[in-house]
Image: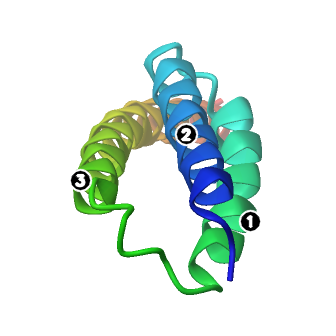
Amino acid sequence: MMSVGKQATDIKKIIVLSEKMLSQARKEDWENVTKIESQRRELIAAFFSQPVHERNGQLADVIRQILDKDREIIKLGAGRREKLRSALRKINRGKIAVESYKVAV
């Protein structure tokens, strides 16, 4: 079983990584978001692979904080995805216009 101190340190690392992910998402640096998320995922898996000490009573609040950050990241990602879809639609319309021009000429 992991010590209370080690669990507290690990949960702080998870929070810091979550905050970094959110910061990078706000900057639309999605490559770094995915890199940080990979690190965080490993740390979360290791954290929950062992029993959590009952004395670590703030864990539920911490999990809520992490989930709140994740929801905001997801919202930012959805906005970015929509921007990309719009850009792709414009590109496709341009391709269609070029092809129509080629046929007409």
Res. 105 mark: none
Amino acid carrying label 3: it is Arg
Question: Viewed as shown, does residue 40 lie left or right of 48?
Answer: right
Q: Residue at x 65, y 75 (%)?
A: 45
3D distance between C-alphas at marks 1 and 2: 14 Å
**SS label for mark 2:** helix
Residue nearer the viewer, 43 or 74: 43
Residue 68 in view in this figure? yes
**Mark 1 or mark 2: whose residue is earlier in sequence:** 2
- Marks 1 and 2 in Cβ contact (< 8 Å): no
Question: Viewed as shown, does residue 35 lie left or right of 101?
Answer: right
Q: Position of residue 11 (x, y in %)?
A: 54, 50
3D distance between C-alphas at marks 3 and 1: 19 Å
Residue 20 vertical position relative to residue 85 in the rendered view, above or below: above
Q: Residue at x 63, y 70 (%)?
A: 47
Label 2 environment density (alpha carbons within 10 Å; few <14, some 14–19, many ≥20): few
Q: Position of residue 15 (x, y in %)?
A: 49, 39
Label 3 environment density (alpha carbons within 10 Å; few <14, some 14–19, many ≥20): few
Q: Position of residue 10 (x, y in %)?
A: 64, 51
Amino acid carrying label 1: it is Glu
Would you name the residue on which mark 2 appears?
12
Report which quarter residue 68 is drawn in.
top left
**Mark 3 or mark 1: whose residue is earlier in sequence:** 1
Q: Residue at x 57, y 60 (%)?
A: 4
Q: Position of residue 86 (x, y in %)?
A: 37, 34
Question: Viewed as shown, does residue 89 lie left or right of 96?
Answer: left
Residue nearer the viewer, 82 or 98: 82
Q: Residue at x 53, y 21 (%)?
A: 28
Would you name the residue on which mark 1 appears?
42
Would you name the residue on which mark 3 appears?
64
Q: Residue furthest top?
A: 27
* Quarter of the image with the N terminus in it: bottom right
